[in-house]
């Protein structure tokens, strides 16, 4: 296991990145590497296999994408011939959202190089992806199912892959992707570099690493199975029937305290997710649902609305628990506890990111006490059980008093600054057909180009 503690933090320039990569990094405004970057990048650049314990939100995408770009840069070619652009690095992710976000970052980091980057995932038409793959791609980001579809159709060939990255590997196993992973890995040359990133190192993950990694370096940025210290966790014991009302009370209390109402609310089922979003709407809360039954276009529209602030409560199943890059999310509410304690950590990991503060509120009924015990056992700490905030300003709970003297939104340390949609994104949101927006009939967001074939950002 790596023991580097980076007392003297290196700069990006000191890693020896080529100028086009360095330029892109600086353009992103990154001034210094995050801890996972400082620890992982030198090993990845040296071609070592790496097992990284890091959640999304820690800067892990750049931790592997930047050194990969550096390593395959000597083979980059400006030739138009597809044969000169075989898939050299493959990133596998469990969800479409994560694939999209990794690709979004990869485009930005690769934009000044000749390295072609693309993303393929399910839920959208294959033909645009096929065209793209046929024209040649060096860095491919994919979800396993859709990649296998392309392999079957012979539009993706993995015989020249030199670097394989399994991102959020624990999630891939949870989602039953092991057989798909095994099939994909069997098509990649054994002589390769393999990187595995996972929020937790469960026995299953260790087994996966033993099977596919060679003497890996282990890098860890947070305590295993720990939530960020900046997340304030509270449990409200509430009967199942009262949970929706409880959410309204929580959000009303946040408004009184001058806090943002922006929150992600996790539910366990797709049906419950859709129902809760509708009920909250009836209660006057601007809510949207994101779950596996929604088309990719619908999910994207909902996420965009949430990021722009048009939706204040994003009701989600675990499909949204990982990979959503939403800076400084102020509050996560668990409408139900997840059946798997590790999912709780992933859920609340949506808040308190990159050192910002956040509230994680769990609504727990008596039947969930056992799940709560499991979570406390995993986190090695007891969660604070508090009464629900009451309805009138005078009876607001004392816990909040330190924050309530800062009612102005901008002075609120929890204030969630919604994304500023770029001019092109705004333009594309006028597109009536959501799928059309996603596959980029209009030139829009960077990831859009990936699906269409515009893999190289200039
Ligand atoms: P990730 O964990 O890869 O999803 O990254 C989370 C967020 O951190 C993304 O918005 C990145 O653009 C951002 N980020 C990555 N590296 C750095 C860095 N060195 N400095 C500042 N922000 C960064």
Image: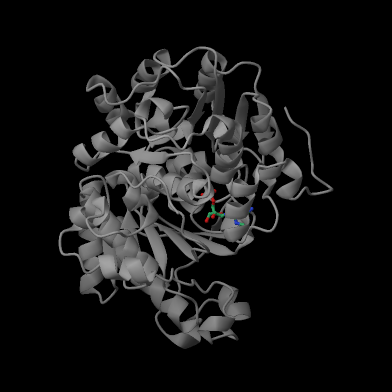
In the rendered image, the residue lying farthest to the front is: 79
Asked whether residue 75 is in view, the answer is: yes
Picture coordinates of residue 136, whole percent (x, y): 36, 32
Picture coordinates of residue 175, whole percent (x, y): 35, 31
Quadrant housing residue 155? top left
Out of 168 and 222, give the one closest to the viewer: 168
- The residue under the point 55% across, 23% down is 194
Q: Is residue 297 left or right of residue 213?
A: left
User: How many numbered tags mark residues here?
Assistant: 0
Relative to 237, is 225 above or below? above
Out of 83 and 53, give the one closest to the viewer: 83
- The residue under the point 41% across, 16% down is 159
Out of 173 and 439, give the one closest to the viewer: 439
Relative to 267, is 211 above or below? above
Asked whether residue 242 is in view, the answer is: no
Q: Quadrant of the C terminus?
A: bottom left
- The residue under the point 84% across, 48% down is 8
Picture coordinates of residue 60, whole percent (x, y): 57, 43
Quadrant housing residue 63? top right
Relative to 244, is 204 above or below? above
Q: Quadrant of the N terminus?
A: top right
Q: Is residue 273 left or right of residue 421?
A: left
Picture coordinates of residue 311, whole percent (x, y): 32, 70
- The residue under the point 29% across, 73% down is 285
* Colour style of the rendered protein structure: one colour
In the rendered image, the residue lying farthest to the right is: 8
């Amino acid at each position: 296991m790596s023991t580097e503690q980076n007392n003297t933090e290196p700069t990006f320039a000191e890693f020896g990145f080529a100028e086009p990569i360095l330029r892109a990094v600086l353009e992103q405004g990154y001034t210094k590497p995050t801890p996972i970057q400082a620890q992982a990048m030198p090993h990845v650049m040296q071609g070592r296999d790496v097992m990284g314990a890091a959640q999304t939100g820690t800067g892990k995408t750049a931790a592997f994408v930047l050194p990969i770009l550096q390593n395959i840069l000597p083979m980059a070619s400006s030739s138009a011939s597809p044969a000169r652009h075989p898939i050299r690095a493959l990133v596998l992710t469990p969800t479409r959202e994560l694939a999209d976000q990794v690709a979004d970052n990869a485009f930005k980091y690769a934009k000044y190089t000749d390295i072609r980057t693309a993303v393929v995932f399910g839920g959208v038409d294959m033909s645009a992806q096929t065209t793209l793959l046929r024209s040649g791609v060096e860095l491919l980001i994919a979800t396993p199912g859709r990649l296998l579809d392309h392999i079957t159709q012979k539009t993706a060939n993995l015989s020249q892959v030199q670097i394989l990255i399994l991102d959020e590997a624990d999630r891939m196993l949870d989602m039953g992707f092991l057989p798909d992973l095994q099939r994909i890995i069997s098509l990649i040359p054994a002589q390769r570099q393999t990187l595995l990133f996972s929020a937790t190192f469960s026995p299953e993950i260790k087994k996966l690493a033993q099977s596919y990694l060679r003497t890996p370096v282990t890098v860890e940025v947070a305590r295993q199975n720990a939530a960020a210290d900046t997340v304030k966790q509270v449990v409200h014991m509430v009967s199942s029937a009262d949970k929706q009302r409880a959410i309204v009370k929580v959000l009303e209390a946040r408004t009184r305290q001058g806090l943002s109402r922006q929150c992600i609310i996790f539910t366990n089922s797709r049906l419950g997710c859709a129902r809760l979003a509708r009920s909250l709407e009836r209660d006057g809360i601007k809510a949207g649902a994101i779950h596996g039954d929604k088309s990719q276009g619908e999910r994207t529209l909902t996420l965009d609305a949430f990021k722009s602030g048009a939706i204040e409560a994003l009701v989600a199943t675990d499909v949204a628990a990982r990979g959503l890059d939403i800076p400084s999310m102020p509050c996560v509410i668990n409408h139900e506890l997840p059946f798997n304690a590790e999912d709780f950590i992933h859920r609340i990991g949506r808040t308190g990111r990159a050192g910002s503060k956040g509230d994680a509120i769990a609504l727990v009924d008596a039947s969930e006490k056992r799940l709560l015990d499991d979570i406390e056992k995993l986190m090695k700490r007891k969660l604070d059980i508090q009464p629900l905030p009451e309805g009138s300003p005078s009876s607001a709970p004392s816990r909040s008093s330190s924050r309530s003297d800062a009612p102005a939104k901008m002075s609120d340390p929890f204030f969630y600054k919604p994304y500023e949609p770029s001019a092109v994104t705004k333009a594309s949101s006028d597109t009536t057909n959501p799928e059309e927006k996603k596959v980029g009939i209009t030139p829009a967001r960077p990831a859009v180009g990936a699906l269409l074939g515009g893999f190289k950002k200039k």
